[in-house]
Image (cartoon, grey):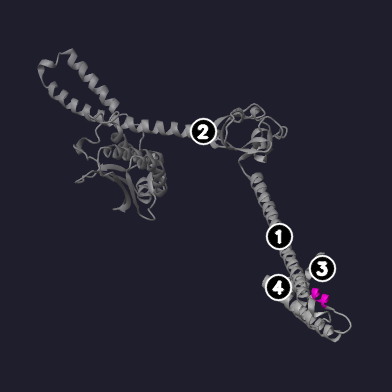
Amino acid sequence: MKDLLSIYAPANRTKMVVVATFLIAGIAAIDWWAIHYISLGFLYLFPIIILGGFLSRTQIIGVALVCAVLQEAFSNLPESEAVSRLLFSSAGFVGTGLFISEMIRNRRIVLQHAEELEDQVKLREDAEQQLRSLVESSPAAIVTIDAEGKVLLANEAAQQLFSPKGAPLQGQLIRSYLPSLRTVLKTQSPRSFRTTLQCTGQRADGEVFLAGVWFSTYKTMSGPRLAAIIVDLSEDLRNREDLSLDHLLKNSRILMSTVAHEMRNLSSAVLVVYKNLSRLKELDANEDFRALGGLIQSLERMSALELGSTPARNGEVVELTSVLDELRILIETTYHESNIDVQWQVEQQLPLVWADRYGLIQVFLNVAKNSQRAMLSTETKQLRITACEENGRVVIRFEDSGTGVAVPDELFRPFQRGAKASGLGLYISRAIMRSFGGELSYEPRSQGSCFAVALPLHVAAVETVNA
């Protein structure tokens, strides 16, 4: 049947239409020649069958009527029944042509659908192959779990994470490794959901680790399923805690050095007063006065404590653009929730600077939060952050439309009256900046306030250290 219908291929249209035309002409000629012997009008069915696969419905009806007229014209049957014969033959020819037309059209539709299905099957197989390759090559553990908590599928990374030398994970209960996921499956939810969690995981050998899990639930004919991506966060946790401790010790050393500096100034002033009083002969034999001198000397020795805080030891090469990108991520959501417009004007290709990356982020956050608090009660809420190179340094300015600063001279003094929290924020921030050779200063504005963070260039800092 397929070979028989192949003559109706679109490429054969012109050839078959010509063949059908010659058939009609030939049948008409033979019918005319044999008009007194026999009627051959039924043979017009064959060209109509051929043309039915190529012509439109209107064209088929036209050809069928022509063939019916030719059949009746070369017929020797009684003329009294000519009209009825013409009607019946026209109906037969038209019906045959339309039947063939619909059959061929339906066949083409079926073939087109079959091709589309083949293409879809091929695309799906390709997608499945790519997904399978992605899952198997993923460095993160990927598992799927059924409603009973059994592992249905697990990639090689999952096997290495949970049981590198043990039995395959397929078929095992997930509660042996991640009890939290089993709890999620027990919680029957009417709809699918996706979320993340951090929980404690356990390997086959009993080793405990911190797991970061991204999972989603979905429905199947066999019940609910859960797909999860799991990574081991233990090393990140250790690194984060070590880094936090390191920066805590570093900031404590900076703070103690700053406090020692303030104590040195105070002890120097007290020492001057003590020396002036020691000129009085009435106090020469006073035991309390001599004890006071000992206390002043002890205070002076404490204030001279040297903690080894130098820019060369506290700083490193920092790519400032990436630090500002991190700051943008940290503050923009909170600022938008407070209806504060943040404008960024950062020069392209900023040079490398000498700073402590973690300390720099802390200073930026402190200054930005101060600006946010200053704009809580103002109608215009706008913060403009600019970064550019000026006079051999990179200067980052935080200029806001807040209430401004009433007494700029007291900004960087600790334990100020009316200050939020302990009043140490700007004091410690400037101490952090100075620890690696930078500076934090206030620049007066007619409206609002502006804080400038100045950082030494990497080249200048290296030259200073080498000198």
Query: Under tag 3, what secondary structure?
Result: helix
Is 392 covered by the magenta stretch?
Answer: no
User: Residue 102: which quarter of the image?
Assistant: bottom right
Which comes sooner in the sequence, label 2 or label 3?
Answer: 3
Q: Which residue is mark 2?
A: 237
Distance of mark 2 from mark 3, alpha carbons? 73 Å
Badge 2 amino acid: Leu
Q: Does residue 16 sit above or below 269 in this rendering?
A: below
Q: Position of residue 132 (x, y in %)?
A: 67, 47
Q: Does residue 72 sit above or below 152 in this rendering?
A: below
| Left or right: 187 as drawn, with respect to 463 | right
Which comes sooner in the sequence, label 1 or label 3?
Answer: 3
Q: Which residue is mark 4?
A: 61
Q: Position of residue 136 (x, y in %)?
A: 66, 44
Task: Tell me the magenta residue range.
Answer: 41-46
| Left or right: 305 as drawn, with respect to 274 | right
